Amino acid sequence: MAYHHTIGKKTYRFNDLKTLLAKASPHRSGDVLAGLAAESYEERVAAQITLADVPLKVFLNEAIIPYEKDEITRLIIDSHNDTAFGLISSLTVGEFRDWLLKEETDTLTLKNLALGITPEIAAAVSKLMRNQDLIAVAKKCEVISSFRDTIGLKGHFSTRLQPNHPTDDPKGIAASMIDGLLYGSGDAVIGINPATDSPAEVNNLLLLIDTLRQQFDIPTQSCVLCHVTTTLELINQGAPVDLCFQSIGGTEQSNTSFGISLDLLDEAYQATLSLNRGTIGNNVMYFETGQGSELSANAHHGVDQQTCEVRAYAVARKYKPLLVNTVVGFIGPEYLYDGKQIIRAALEDHFCGKLLGLPMGVDVCYTNHAEADQDDMDNLLTLLGVAGCNFVMGIPGSDDIMLNYQSTSFHDALYLRNVLGLRAAPEFEAWLMKQGIMDTQGKLMPKPDQRLLKGIKELWMK
């Protein structure tokens, strides 16, 4: 179905819904690289005006990637909840935006609606929204997940303690873990990006985190971010796997480039569930995404990068994850050129993920060849805190020495908790107070419990 809009004497024509979504998307370098972006500001406005008048029902009948060619499309269509969709089925995209911003559209309403929203609907409405709108609606969403502690409660803000090391040196990783814990970081997960995907090395890292966790009875979860097939192998060997990690994309072809399929994820999900290692919940999956991954794999099918990104959230939603993390600026300026584009993309991702019912976190990050700096990241971190983001990264000095990119530090998380009055996950915060790391107001204590420090020293010396 073709769409068109006239401005003055010029008529803009959009051959199908896929083209309309791409042309309506806010400007970013990845869409320009793919030849999908609007050629002018006027064309973008024409596309947005046209998109605003498209009935939401159209998205259920016009697949942007054919049903028979893509298992993600099949997942989206086959899992759609018509009953939930009934609440908004009479609306256009523009009317849906207005409805989302109404005060009476509250947290419970959005929770009940989540399974009625397709990724394409979420992506479409985000393209009509200001940054302020994305923040205001995301703030109303509450998506809670749990394993050994509870992530995503309103008024709480968590971190992934990310103790990466370029050679997976155990002492270096242990030092970073200890540093992060003493700053109150790590309630979302203690998660290591391994330098190698060797099952033996990954197992060593899992044992390292699990030893620390058990020795000090820390109510958190561990994850070594290896390929899902490595995790499956380690589960079969009896390794202490808490969470199963995988990077995912929004098309079948992009997931093939990651070496995965829905069938493989099904197997991994069931295997990890069967371990029953959670104490208060059974959300066992950890997914990471990022705008541009489909384009970098030449697997976007002419779909703009933001819509592809939101389609990946349909994959995540299938497995009821503990954490979903958009690593927003990691791929580089070819996809998100500068701080402005990174900020916009992060707010879109967080909004769309929350709208679809996902426990969204954001890696507030950039590569050193992007036109961005730490001031941009401070701005984004603050905006995400206001928007109710579930978690961010905690990295020593905000500089990941293994992955070679800039992210957020333990101090950044403390800043956000302090200025916005946010707290760590309740179970983790209780542990921090018990250890003398934080007081009852969520502030760092000047000196932790000496028994903890002695135990940490002894563990590190080993």
Image (tube, helix red, strand yellow):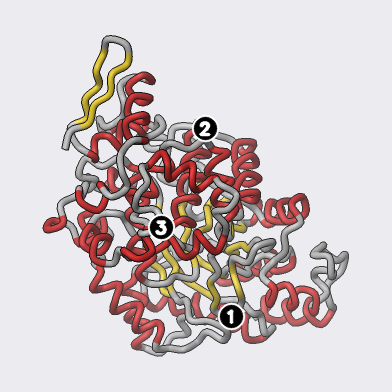
Q: Is residue 64 visible?
A: yes
Tell me, yes or no, whether the two marked residues, 2 and 1, touch with CB atoms within 8 Å: no
| Residue toward you, 163 or 50 | 50
Number of marks in picture: 3
Q: Is residue 32 visible?
A: no
| Residue toward you, 339 or 67 | 67
Vertical arrangement, residue 213 with respect to residue 362, above or below: below
| Residue toward you, 136 or 400 | 136
Amino acid type shown at disc 2:
Lys
According to the picture, the residue beneath numbered tag 3 turns out to be 87
Image location (x, y in percent) of residue 362:
52, 53
Image location (x, y in percent) of residue 85:
36, 59
The dot on residue 200 is: none
Q: CA distance from mark 3 to mark 1?
A: 35 Å
The dot on residue 340 is: 2
Label 1 crowd bin: few (<14), some (14–19), many (20+), radius 10 Å: many
Q: Earlier in the sequence, mark 2 or mark 1?
A: 1
Vertical arrangement, residue 426 with respect to residue 339, above or below: below
Label 3 crowd bin: few (<14), some (14–19), many (20+), radius 10 Å: few
**Left or right: 239 as drawn, with respect to 419:** left
Amino acid type shown at disc 1:
Arg
What's the residue at 30%, 72% (across, down)? Answer: 265
- Outermost residue, front side: 90
What's the residue at 53%, 61% (across, down)? Answer: 165
Which numbered mark, 3 or 1, is in the foreground of this view? 3
Badge 1 marks a residue whose secondary structure is: loop
Q: Which of the 4 quarters of the picture holds residue 215?
A: bottom right
In the picture, which quadrant includes the N terminus?
Answer: top left
- Outermost residue, left side: 68
- Outermost residue, right side: 446
Q: Earlier in the sequence, mark 3 or mark 1?
A: 3
Vertical arrangement, residue 302 with respect to residue 459, above or below: above
